[in-house]
Image: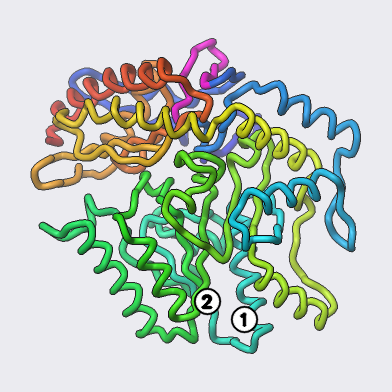
Amino acid sequence: MPFLNSTGDLDKAAHLHPYTNARKFEAEGPRVMERGNGIYVYDDQGNEYIEALAGLWSVAVGFGEKRLVDAAAEQMAKLPYYHVFSQKTHSPAAKLADKLVAMTPEHLTKVFFTNSGSEANDTVVKLIWFLNNALGRPDKKKFIARQNAYHGITVASGSLTGLPWNHASFDLPAIPVRHLTCPHAYFFAHDGEADAQFAQRLADELESTILREGAETIAAFIGEPLMGAGGVLVPPDGYWEKVQEICRRYDILIIADEVITGFGRTGKMFACETFGITPDIMVLSKQITSSYQPLAAVVLSDQLYQTIADHTAKLGNLGHGFTGSGHPVAAAVALENLAIIEERGLVENAAAMGQVLRVELEKFSDHPLVGEVRGVGLIAAVQLIADKRTRRRFAPEGKVGSFVFERAHHYGLIVRNVRDAIAFCPPLIINEAEVREIAIRFGKVLGDALDYAEANKMI
């Protein structure tokens, strides 16, 4: 994440990481992005790029969508800001809450708005602690998450996150959380272990953790239906069914973090449908507004809400909320954005184009650097590997992935590397020709990456 210097410019010294090898590939340094149109963005030098990560997994309807600009301007002129405190609300927030309740699973009936997914997951932690205090269960405060999970970067949400670089030197985790094995078979299944066996081992680990810690101390299990920022990690078949059965048996809440996967990304409106998850709480953000405005939502069951409301009445106040919660401009943009997703059939398009994307990426399966191609719907990753036979990772890990990320710009392509996994998550509006163009440009990057790895004696 970039720092700005005193003049407001990107600090180039902090971000310039040149690569040197026989072909003298070098990073080009920070780029100033000026505008966007559809799946494309343009920098201040006029260079065009396919934004194959939809910004940060989030611009569903593409860049430069006039209907969202108009919705923001209209609301800005009418009521540019108001809060949802002290028995007050406004039309955009009320309408959006109704819309989300109608879209999400039937038993989820209440909505709490925040400004980001990190704030939303922080809110979930606090509400669950509040809930268990209300129920006279002061020890039921621990969370179960997974290694390589991403749930945000604030103190509580960053603690739930299971990525080492989000913890290093931040004194995290700072809340009681236990991180279990990442449900990604390619790296974490044992030799010869089938998906069903891997899923069962993960379920056994979950149950043994609950028994060791004490079910009376564990409040909730939080998980992304598939892990996005950890590298587009798809769980094995049967995994979520087993997790849910165990959590229900031990009275542990299930939180579905749909910040990346919500609103069509997996080819269904929500990934809970894709993976058969019935959550007690859903966390939504990113594609809720296509990130044209900051907004997130916590959607929970009436049963949980009522316990919180009753305890609030007893205390006289719920001491939690944000100045921008349910911001009227953000809510107005969200309503228009969701209307576009539905009217243009973008969920269905994500399913169809996702299939094309995986077919195109799987054509690289025989490439010396490609170990795995994975994904669901319109989100995918190509795992780069030093040795395909042994699945040996590059050393240092992430250097080849960083090269691919940087070099892709040379071919007018923006992707994201998670260590040595290359992630693809283009806008839901993408068409078949554009998907194939992503693959063509990526193929050129892979050719350079092979030269780079060979020149640096990494394979």
State which region is magenta: 39-52
Q: Amino acid at mark 2?
A: Ala
Q: Quadrant of the C terminus?
A: top left
The residue at 62%/34% (across/down) is 342
Q: Identify the mark at residue 219; answer none if there is no mark.
A: 2
Q: Identify the mark at residue 325; answer none if there is no mark.
A: none
The residue at 38%/41% (across/down) is 376
| Mark 2 burial class by Cα count in 10 Å: few <14, some 14-19, many 20+ | many
Q: Identify the mark at residue 132; answer none if there is no mark.
A: 1
Query: Is there a contact, CB below 8 Å, between mark 1 and mark 2?
Result: yes
Q: Nearer the viewer, residue 410 or 74?
A: 74
Q: In the rendered structure, which disc, 1 or 2, sits on the residue that comes first in sequence?
A: 1
| Mark 1 burial class by Cα count in 10 Å: few <14, some 14-19, many 20+ | some
Residue 327, image x, y percentages: 78, 46
Q: From this viewpoint, which residue is outermost toward the bottom?
A: 136
Q: From this viewpoint, which residue is outermost toward the front?
A: 106
